[in-house]
Image: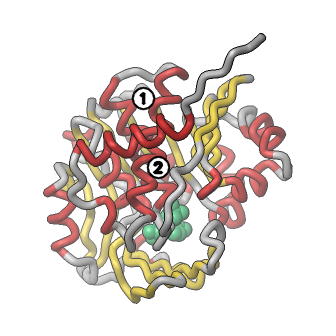
Amino acid sequence: MSLLVVGSVALDGIETPFGKVDKTIGGSGTYISFSSSYFAPKVNLVAIVGYDFPKEALAMLNQHGIDTSGVQIKEDRKSFFWKGKYYHDMNSRDTLVTELNVLADFDPIIPEKYQDCEYLMLGNLAPKTQQTVINRLRKRPKLIMMDTMNFWISTALEDLLQTLQMVDILSINDEEARQLSAEYSLLKAAKKILTMGPKYLIIKKGEHGALLFHKDQIFFTPALPLEDVFDPTGAGDTFAGGFIGYLAQTEDISFENMKRAVVYASAMASFCVGKFGTEGLIGLSQEAILNRVREFVDLVQFEIVMA
Ligand code: AMP
């Protein structure tokens, strides 16, 4: 089943205690596409880049089976640029630079051949742009998932609240859930957010795992304990890509299957953080992914005899 991904395709500057890069390829659309390409039968990407975006990076996406004919290239403008800095606690970061550049007036054009998508993943982008994508699809996809971030909660809350009414699943991190709901308790935050539109909510807690909420049901999975986390950039997007990619592959959007999707999503995120930028997501084998998933199963499975 085909998956349409819309998100930022960017140049990122990243600084962590383990290294620094001035410009590497990144963006929500990039991480989501790479991650979902291991599952979804077809991944189509709608995005925008400028003259400075390396053509080899688009070729790399194509090598992963991702259709990039929906990526607009503006020859007279610069690509979206984001720069972040992490400290030893990799669960939080400072955003040092956000230069919207081409993203400032991104008009998402959906190629005709992408119109029949059954799954839609709206990566971190201006909420108005996310709405435009939904409105431009002639048929509502079977499942619409979206991500957002503190930047949009602070600068475009009204638009964001409207977009939330149009989607099935929202995926955000704990800090964003607290900001959006004005509740500190994540359970209270989830309850509130589930009244804002989405029927399902995923709250990512970095190295502390992820929670999936639906009505009064909750599912939790830890993050895989890793000796070395080099760069958490894109982990949330990678998680989202693995999650919706798995649903598209299995064509099952039940809550039970979403639990499995959360485990696959967490496995993909563990590949992302183990290397710099998108490097950890390039050229993975199905065997490597399955082994990671097995590690998760071993980590959390236990038997208990209830008296
Ligand atoms: P994550 O670590 O999952 O939150 O995603 C990091 C990615 O999000 C980076 O590759 C950035 O290029 C991208 N990003 C950061 N800020 C924004 C924004 N305001 N809009 C769209 N994408 C962004």
Left or right: residue 63 versus residue 281 is: left
> Is residue 153 left or right of 23 when viewed as pictured?
right
Q: Could you say where residue 31 lies in the image, as x and y percent from the top left?
A: 38, 59
Query: Is residue 20 shown to the viewer in this render?
Result: yes
Label 1 environment density (alpha carbons within 10 Å; few <14, some 14–19, many ≥20) = some
Q: Is residue 43 above or below residue 100?
A: above
Q: Which mark is residue 57?
A: none
Q: Residue at x 49, y 50 (%)?
A: 130
What residue appears at the point 63 percent right and 31 percent down from the top-left corner? 219
Q: What is the number of the mark on residue 140?
A: 1
The numbered mark, 2 or 1, whose residue comes first in the sequence reads 1
Task: Kindly state the secondary structure of the residue where label 2 is placed.
Answer: helix
* Image-quadrant location for residue 87: bottom right
Closer to the eye: label 2 or 1: 2
Q: Where on the picture, by quarter, is residue 248?
A: top left
Amino acid type, callout 1: Arg
Give the image location of residue 140, x and y in percent.
42, 29
Which of 210/6 is in front? 210
- Three-letter residue code for mark 2: Phe
Residue 243 x, y percent position in the rendering: 44, 40
Task: Identify the residue at image location x=43%, y=44%.
Answer: 121
Q: Is mark 2 within 8 Å of ligand 1?
A: yes
Task: Residue 119: name its quadrant.
Answer: top left
Q: Where does label 2 land, which residue? A: 239
